[in-house]
Amino acid sequence: MDLTSTTDIKPWRARRAEELLRGAPARRETFERAAREEFAPARTTPLNEFKVELAQRAMIRVLETLISTGSPS
């Protein structure tokens, strides 16, 4: 992959979370469940296990921000 070109970068999809969020109420409990499910298969080591919680919190924060500001269409 050529990191000097943005055409080679593909966004990651949170497919498990997307499935759980589709049609569900937009509230923190739903976001927390979706984040837990999305990162459940993650395999960690003692040196990087903190990253799962960090990613979950980031995901929840983004979802809450989108709800409070209105998501783009």
Image (cartoon, grey):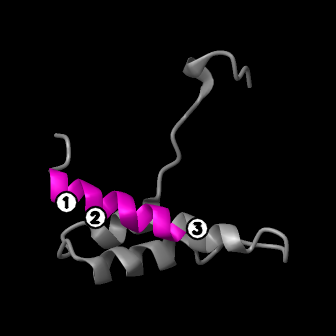
Q: Is the magenta stretch mostly helix, strand or loop?
A: helix
Quick one: 65 or 40, which is closer to the camera? 65
Residue carrying label 3 = 54
Residue beneath the point at 78% across and 68% down: 48
Q: In this view, does 41 lie to the left or right of 30?
A: right
Mark 2 closeness class: few <14, some 14–19, many ≥20 residues within 10 Å: some
Query: Which amino acid, by three-letter code, is at mark 2?
Result: Glu
Q: Which residue is drawn at 56% across and 64% down?
A: 55
x 48%, y 69%: residue? 57
CA distance separating discs 3 and 1: 20 Å
The residue segment tinted magenta is 56-69
Distance from Cα at disc 2 to Cα at disc 1? 5 Å
Q: Say whether disc 3 or disc 2 marks the residue closer to the N-terminus.
A: 3
Q: How far apart are marks 3 and 2 (CA)?
A: 15 Å
Q: Please determine whether, in this image, residue 14 is positioned above or below residue 36.
A: above
Horizontal arrangement in the rendering, residue 24 relative to residue 6 (left or right): left
Query: Residue 60 colored magenta?
Result: yes
Q: Give the class, few, some or many, for how many residues have Cα within 10 Å of label 1's Cα (few <14, many ≥20).
A: few
Q: Say the numbered circle drawn on residue 67.
A: 1
- Give residue 63's position: percent from left, percent from top: 31, 61
Q: Is mark 3 on a helix, strand or loop?
A: helix
